[in-house]
Image: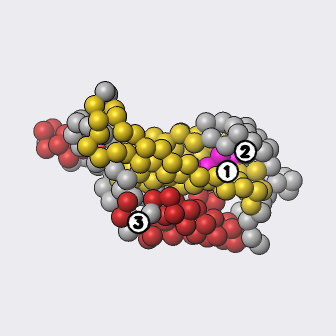
Amino acid sequence: MKPEIRKIVTQTETTLIEGGKSAAKPLDLYAAGVVIQNPWAGQGYVEDLQPAIQAIAPDLGVLLTEQILKLAGSPDNIEAYGKAVVVGLNGEIEHGCGLIHTLRFGNNYRKAVGAKSFLASTNVRGPAGMQILMPLAHKHDEGQRSHFLTMQFTVADAPGPDEILIVLGAANGGRPHHRIGDRYQDLAILGDTDITE
């Protein structure tokens, strides 16, 4: 079984000025999305999602990683990353989760950019054209707040009711003029290593 792909959509965004001040390093955001037919569409409730996950998720991970690397130009240009999925209204959120929350999907991206941290993610059900808010975080260190970013992504005609839209995102750095410190500074001040945000 291969994913039935209707379209691939890519997006880039560059921020040159933030807060009225030029960025020392322009912030580049990259996103690559793929619209596929929901492999469980029309089957009613499916107990075992694993056969389709194992057959489809690896191909999607390879495809979207290749698209992101084309946009970024090099794995070295990616410091933050994330993923998102929107399941069309006839599907279950579990269908989208199955395809992106598996090592068969995420490990390809993680290895390609030399990452150590988990991929920040979001998974929802929604109509065509809904705005996706995809979280990004540092690829090596989730404690670096400078790289807490949210990328906006939309495909006007997707996902259809029986489709799934899967997106990978990346950034070449952190927010311009970031100045709120990181998690480790808080821990040092508070003297508590168990605090989470």
Amino acid type of the residue that numbered disc 1 sits on in the rendered structure: Leu
Element marked by disc 3: helix
Magenta residues? 84-88
Q: CA distance from mark 3 to mark 1?
A: 24 Å
Element marked by disc 1: strand
Residue 137, placed above or below residue 178: below
Residue 26, placed above or below residue 78: above
Tell which of 51 and 57 is nearer to you.
57
Identity of the residue drawn at 54% across and 55% down: 168
- Left or right of 131 in this view: 119: left
Q: CA distance from mark 3 to mark 2?
A: 28 Å
Identity of the residue drawn at 32% across and 28% down: 19
**Is residue 86 shown in magenta?**
yes
Residue 158 is tagged as 2
Label 1 sits on residue: 165
Tell which of 90 and 9 is nearer to you.
9
